[in-house]
Amino acid sequence: MEQTNNNLAFKQKEFANEVIIPEIAKLLDEGHSVTLKLRGVSMRPFLEDGRDKAILTKPCSPLKVGDVVLAEVAPRHYALHRIVKIDGNSVVMRGDGNIATEQCDISKVFGIAHCFYRKGRKSPDYTTGRKWRLYSAVWTALLPVRRYLLVGYRMFLKLKHN
């Protein structure tokens, strides 16, 4: 897809995760920040496939529970999920739209999300901001009923698109 903006042409290309994520990891290792258009539904209902973007950097301080990180959770399988537990070098993560967890070695965490551009907005939601922290606290506390909330959300989306 080609777009123009102020006489500049932009081409948008999509790559498979197993191709692009190792390149993103290299950029993060070199100290760059990366804007990643999100794919998948594992962070629903607040982050949506193809709609939202994350700004990632290499973690510069110790990771903590609640951080949203990009990690390799299995060979050539990557996830942008929230950390729910750290036990030594083992990191346990869960997508906001998931019930199950995934685990990886801390060395397989490539980046941390500092902010998200959601719903086409021009200003980001920072992960250190009051809004994001409140959302995170409430949503993670709702884990026991999350399954039912997500079913309701999916039903709402189907009704909305029909």
Image: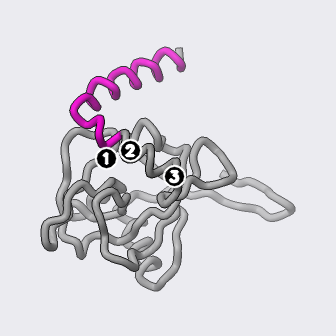
Magenta segment's dominant SS is helix
Q: Can residue 36 be seen in this view?
A: no
Give the magenta part as a residue range. Answer: 139-160
**Residue 78 vs residue 20, the one in the foreground:** 78
Q: Which disc is residue 130 wearing?
A: 3
Residue type, mark 3 in image: Arg
- Closer to the observer: label 1 or label 3? 3
**How far apart are labels 2 and 3 at the CA level?**
19 Å
Residues packed near mark 3 inside 10 Å, few (<14), some (14 to 19) or many (20 plus): few
Magenta region includes residue 114: no
Judged from this view, the residue extending furthest toward the right is 7
Secondary structure type for disc 2: loop
Residue type, mark 1 in image: Gly
Residue displayed at 34% across by 26% down: 149
Q: In which quarter of the image is residue 111?
A: bottom left
**Residue 23 vs residue 135, the one in the foreground:** 135
**How far apart are labels 1 and 2 at the CA level?**
5 Å
